[in-house]
Image (spheres, grey):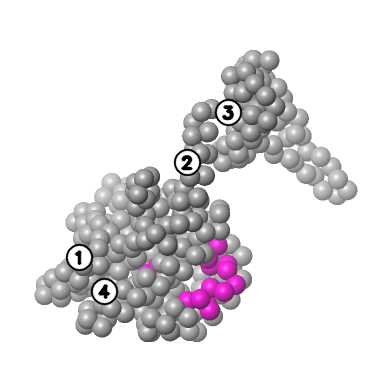
Amino acid sequence: TDTEQAKIRAKALIDLFSKPCAIEHYELIVTPSIGISLFPDDGDDHDTLLKCSDLAMYSAKNEGRNNFQFYSQHLQANDERTTAIEAALRRAIEQNELSLVYQPQVELRSNHITGVEALLRWQHPTLGYISPVEFIPIAEDSGQIIAIGEWVLRTAAKQMKQWLDNGMPLSVIAVNLSALQFRHPNLLFQITKILDEEGLPPHYLELELTERVAMDKPEEAIAIMQSGFKKGIRLSIDDFGTGYSSLSYLKRFPISKLKIDRSFVSHVQEDSDDRAIVSTIIDLANNLGLMTIAEGVENEQQLEFLRMQGCNEVQGYFFSPPTTAEEIERMTSWSENV
C-alpha cells in the first residue's frame, strides 16, 4: 500500500476501536496508538520495519494517544540520542560531569538574599551541554534519577553547610524532588543520613515538589510530607497554579511555601487574567499562613506588581540567573550592605 492508503486504514482502525464495548454493566472504550512504517522506504526486512513502526507507535503515545504516526528519520535520531544520553548518564557522577548552580531567592521586604535554589547541570565531554529539560525525563524513565537525586541532595547540603560555616546569612537551600524520588521508600532515611553526615540542620533544607506530584495519590503524599515535616525539613509546592490542586488537600499539606509559576509572572504587565491568578495565589497563601515566592521575575514592573500584592520572595533573571557558589557569596555580601 502507499501512504494515503495507510492513513485510511489507520483512521478506520481508530474509528473501529473507538466504538464503546459493553462488558457486564460497564461501557469500555479502547484508545489505540498506531505506528506505521512503509516498505521499502523505512526498511526491507521484517525486523527493521517492526522496529520503525514501534518507534512511530511510541511517538503516537507521546502525542496524546488515540492517533497514528508515521516513522521518520527524526524519530530514529531522537531514539539514538536518548539511548546515548541514558548510557552516558550512568557514568556522569563518577566522572564528575554533573554540577550544581544556584539561583538567589530575594526577600522583598528587606531586598536581601535569604535563600537559594540548587539546580542541576550536566556538561558531557563529547555531547556538550545537555539541558535538564532533556536529560531529567530520561533519568526518570531509566530509574537513574534516584542516584542522581542523592548526589544533588548531598552536594547541596555540603555547600549550604560550608556557607553557614563561613557566616553567610542564608536561611534555606531549595532542592527539587522528582516524582520517582518522592515515592521512593528510602527517601527520608536517605535525606536524614545525608544531613547527619554533612552536619546540616534539617530546617536549612527545603524540598520542592511540583503540584502534580503532590496531588498524585494525595493521601500517600501527605503521609510522606508529614514524616519529613516532623524531622524539621521544609516543604514547598513548586509550579503552583499549573496542576490540579484540591483545596481540601492543600490545607492538609504540611508545607511552608507556594511557588508561583513563571508562566503567570511573565505576563502580569499585559494580561489581566495572569494578574488575577497571581493575586489570588498570594491571597490564598496568606490566608493559609503560607509564604509565597514568585519565579521568573525578569523586570522591575513584574517586581513592583508582586511587591504590591504582598508576595514574600522572588527569584529570576532580574536579580541573577543560576550561577556559581562563588558568585552567590559575592552577591550575598552585596545584598547585606544594601
- Look at the image and tell me whether residue 303 can be seen: no
How far is the residue under mark 1 from the one under mark 2? Answer: 34 Å
Q: Which residues are magenta?
A: 174-191
- Above or below for 90 versus 229: above
For mark 3, does the 10 Å Cα neighbourhood hold few (<14), some (14 to 19), or many (20 or more) residues? many
- Above or below for 128 versus 110: above
- Above or below for 104 versus 83: below
User: From this viewpoint, which residue is outermost toward the front?
Assistant: 95
Observer-nearest residue: 291 or 220?
220
* Among numbered discs 3 and 4, the one appearing first in the sequence: 3
The residue labelled by disc 3 is 71
> Does residue 204 show up magenta in the picture?
no
Instruction: Say which amino acid is labelled 3.
Output: Tyr
Instruction: Say which amino acid is labelled 2.
Output: Arg
The residue labelled by disc 1 is 327
| Front tag of 3 and 2 | 2
Q: Secondary structure at mark 2?
A: helix
* Among numbered discs 2 and 4, the one appearing first in the sequence: 2
How far is the residue under mark 3 from the one under mark 2? Answer: 16 Å
Please give the label number shown on residue 114.
4
- Look at the image and tell me whether residue 267 can be seen: yes
Observer-nearest residue: 22 or 60?
60
- Residue 236: image quadrant is bottom left
User: From this viewpoint, which residue is outermost toward the left?
Assistant: 337
Q: Are marks 1 and 2 in contact (CB under 8 Å)?
A: no
